[in-house]
Image (cartoon, coloured by chain):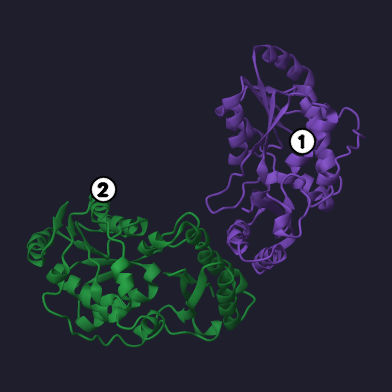
Chain colours: A green, B purple
Amino acid sequence: MEIIRTVAELQAKLGEARSRGTIGLVPTMGALHAGHLSLIERAREENDTVVVSVFVNPTQFNNPTDLATYPRTEEADAALMEGAGVDYAFMPSVEEVYPEPDNRQFDLGPVAEVMEGAMRPGHFNGVAQVVSKLFRFTEPTRAYFGEKDFQQIAVIRRMVELEGFEGLEIVDCPIKRETDGLALSSRNVRLSAEQRSVAPVIAQVLRSSLIKAREMSLADTKKWVTDTINVFPFMNVEYYEIVDALTMQPIAEWSESEQPVGCITVFCGDVRLIDNIKYVR
Amino acid sequence: MEIIRTVAELQAKLGEARSRGTIGLVPTMGALHAGHLSLIERAREENDTVVVSVFVNPTQFNNPTDLATYPRTEEADAALMEGAGVDYAFMPSVEEVYPEPDNRQFDLGPVAEVMEGAMRPGHFNGVAQVVSKLFRFTEPTRAYFGEKDFQQIAVIRRMVELEGFEGLEIVDCPIKRETDGLALSSRNVRLSAEQRSVAPVIAQVLRSSLIKAREMSLADTKKWVTDTINVFPFMNVEYYEIVDALTMQPIAEWSESEQPVGCITVFCGDVRLIDNIKYVR
């Protein structure tokens, strides 16, 4: 595995690689965990060359404290990537990615106006900025994203349309979870031991809501999820939306979508956790 | 390992063993899981000879359906015991243990009048019958019990006092849990997949109640636990008591005990699950 710090070197290496076959890109913000590893393993299986980018992208952080405290574990990340058979670990500086400010505003449309888009102003535009740059730098065959950031995948598909990345395949991969159900996330390390002991309740309540949903209206199911999580210590539901999986738009009745997805954001203490679950119609 | 089917053979083998050193007894009702294994492993570490009894004791079942459907997995049990280094697996028939009816009524006192004693008439007397027989058959140095059946341990200590088993050490061992927190129990196999997916909420709520307890009265904490579990599908709390760990008597205020223990019984569908948690004063 080679660690690459500059766009120029990345493009030189991948120019060669591209002639040899397919390129799989896994864009990450580092602090790699088993969720990232599952994306990397899939990329490894499906492509001749695997590139993983590790870059904490400032433009997608609406909360400066979140940016400042985002976990950074470069050595462990390199070891994980090496062990997983990654060919190139792209680990650039902020200056390398943004030699000058990126003032682009992407017309991300309705998928980006709800939920995370509403709660984190500027976030998805920042995601579109960095991912479009990574796609231009690497010109991958396939790019891998995890479903924990469910809305993000829809936003990236929209960006790919806007930017005209022909032939690029966006691969979405299932959420990975701790054995107690907590969705893996780099931010989990910020949880105190006590908060960590309560955090599994999010996934527990979502799972249980699949059963409640058979007998409850959509509105009552949303209320049940929110109220039930909120009684637990440290927990504060920022939002729970049930949306159509394709449009990401909230629905009011089960009948409005063949693929309802519940998307939740919960503050566990100060740590913002997200998760989602697919309802069966 | 030898499988022993009769009391006579057991006593013959253990007569020899007793001259060689200590005897550890692990009484079980079979359908052995990792919880039982932890008791067996501890007995193996601490004694020269290990006896495990596998016997579904009819006299402690107040519910005939529970008795009829109690899981029985003799071959798997034998394999587990063999692997764990058990010397003698005592696996008698009902007739061998009860050649004639056991009409003894033990004066188990206040520890047996509350909680499981109140909800399962005759249960603890049946436990006292079979365990006193097993103690007389094996005359062990030490006998091992799991804290999942927290009240049972207090009842057995009382029976040991009444029956005068001098020098017998009752060893209580911590609860073992699935990775999602569900306390291990032979009855867990009866849970449907959906019920099993909800069952971890019991332990989750108990754990979270430790945090709530810092700011809530005892009565409010009990109500919080009960109400919170009850909103989940399939869940029906039979009782939640907070008792003193030594006397097993319910307390009304935190100040009444240095060692409060919460003991819960919940129906998950038709399956009766128990668990407990120690509060920190």
Residue B256 as seen in the image, left or right of residue A82: right
Number of the label disc, if any, that sits on residue B112: none
Task: Pinpoint residue A280: horizontal percent, then vertical percent.
Answer: 53, 72
Residue A179 as seen in the image, left or right of residue A135: right
Number of the label disc, if any, that sits on residue B157: 1
- The answer to whether residue B259 is seen in the rendering is yes
Relative to B251, say whether B36 is above or below.
Answer: above
At horizontal 24% and vertical 71% (from top left) the residue drawn is: A57
Amino acid type, residue under disc 2 in the picture:
Gly
Q: Nearer the viewer, residue A69 or A80?
A: A69
Relative to A155, say whether B89 is above or below.
Answer: above
At horizontal 39% and vertical 62% (from top left) the residue drawn is: A190
Find residue B197 and report its image quarter: bottom right
Task: Pinpoint residue A265: horizontal percent, then vertical percent.
Answer: 45, 74
Real-space CA distance between mark 2 and mark 1, rounded to the nearest whole angstrom: 54 Å
Q: Is disc 2 surrounded by few (<14), some (14 to 19) or many (20+) residues within 10 Å?
A: few
Q: Which residue is mark 2?
A: A83
Tally the numbered discs: 2
At horizontal 71% and vertical 37% (from top left) the residue drawn is: B29
Amino acid type, residue under disc 1 in the picture:
Arg
Task: Pinpoint residue B199: horizontal percent, then vertical percent.
Answer: 62, 58
Find residue B173 and report its image quarter: top right
Secondary element under disc 2, as helix, strand or loop, is helix
Pointers 2 and 1 in contact (CB under 8 A)? no
